[in-house]
Amino acid sequence: MQLFRPGANTIATVMIAAIGAAPVLAVGLSYEVMLSPYVTNQNISRNQPVPFSHEHHVSGLGLDCRYCHASVEKARFAGIPPTETCMTCHSQIWTNALMLAPVRESLSKNQPIAWERVHRLPDYVYFDHSVHVAKGVGCTTCHGDVGRMRLMRQAAPLTMQWCLDCHRSPERFLRPREAVFDPNWQAPKNQAEIGPKLAAGYHINTGHLTDCTICHR
Amino acid sequence: MTLRSLSSLLLLSLALAGCGDHSMSQQNRYSTFSKAGLFRDGTEAQPLPQGTVAQGDPERSRQITTPPAVDMALLSRGRERYDIYCSPCHGFSGHGDGMIVQRGFPAPPSYHSARLRSADAQHFFDVITHGYGAMYSYAARVEPRDRWAIIAYIRALQQSQHADVADVPELRSKLP
């Protein structure tokens, strides 16, 4: 009597292979999910109370980031501009635009505009803007092409791997002091040559930059 | 079910439960700029109460009353700050024709007018600190020391539009 059909051997081999592969695939899949925009929020725009356009204000009008994000050189936080900053211009121009009604309402009610946060690190991570800006890391290196964004989105994954990738060898991204706020900066062809010189000039010591306590304090 | 499969089931459910716990990534405190129901305006970023007077910061008071010595470092700081905060309306050379004015903002007076050329530095300081007519105050974004730096740079701009060939001796030989 024959218990197994002729194909049974193949099925058995496939099953054994599948049992072996399953954990690998499962781990791979969960990594894929973990690093996917679904989890990291990369490239997702939020609905804002006012459709504020960086493209318009940065590329169109040539405003410097610091006109609005005034604390970025001095503090951990870049700062979100208060309503009054919008009003330095919009008290006189586009004063009747429907789009700007929430801004005017915020001013008259003395109630801040409730912007939805786009970037958000977990609370157990310590991040500081001022040190990066002072050491020649430009805004667009981390925030992407802000001058082309109609609505703000998170250009980088903001994972630990992403931070570490730069902290291991930041010289690939360093700019001269005056180019840090330039929204159109591109690494020059000889970056490999000038990067290390800039790093030395900024006194960057990568020896401790990957210590856990730098970012988890 | 065997004990082993039971315990692995237990481990698995524990691991899954861990996924829903955000107590470390969203700790039970307000972070900068977060929503905060405790305050009437609903934000953690509270403005100073009206009428607050800085106490015990003699350095800041000193910076307001004493203009720093003018040197090249102060001038380049002034240029940087001017380009960020003033040039959108006053223009890079101070003629009052900046980008925002080209888009319809009321034109400010040129820095090169006789009146503003003879205005004293304190007037400029007060305009930055308190605003002037259609222009808002820039005190929240421009520190006292930077205000003096900007004024020094405006003086340089004024000079640049009223310079004489005699002011630049080396230039004489280069002119046709």
Image: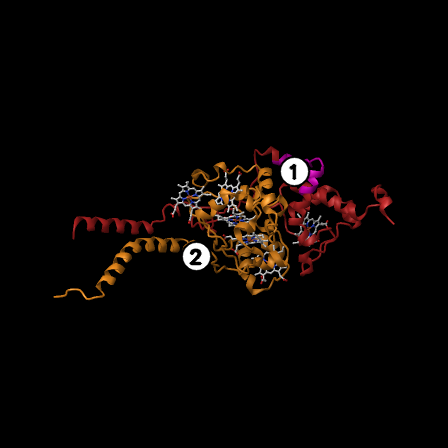
Chain colours: A orange, B red
How many dots with numbers? 2
Amino acid under disc 1: Ile
Q: Label 1, on which residue?
A: B64
- Chain hosting mark 1: B
Count residues near mark 1 (Cα–Cα under 10 Å), then give few for <14, some for 14-19, many for 20+.
some
B81 relative to B107, above or below: above
Magenta residues span B60-77
Q: Is residue B87 visible?
A: yes
- Chain hosting mark 2: A
Q: Residue at x 16, y 50 (%)?
A: B2
What is the x, y in percent for residue B96?
72, 54
Q: Is residue A217 visible?
A: no
Q: Tag on residue A37? A: 2
What is the x, y in percent for residue A208?
48, 36
Count residues near mark 2 (Cα–Cα under 10 Å), then give few for <14, some for 14-19, many for 20+.
some
Q: Is residue B7 a member of the stretch shown in magenta?
A: no
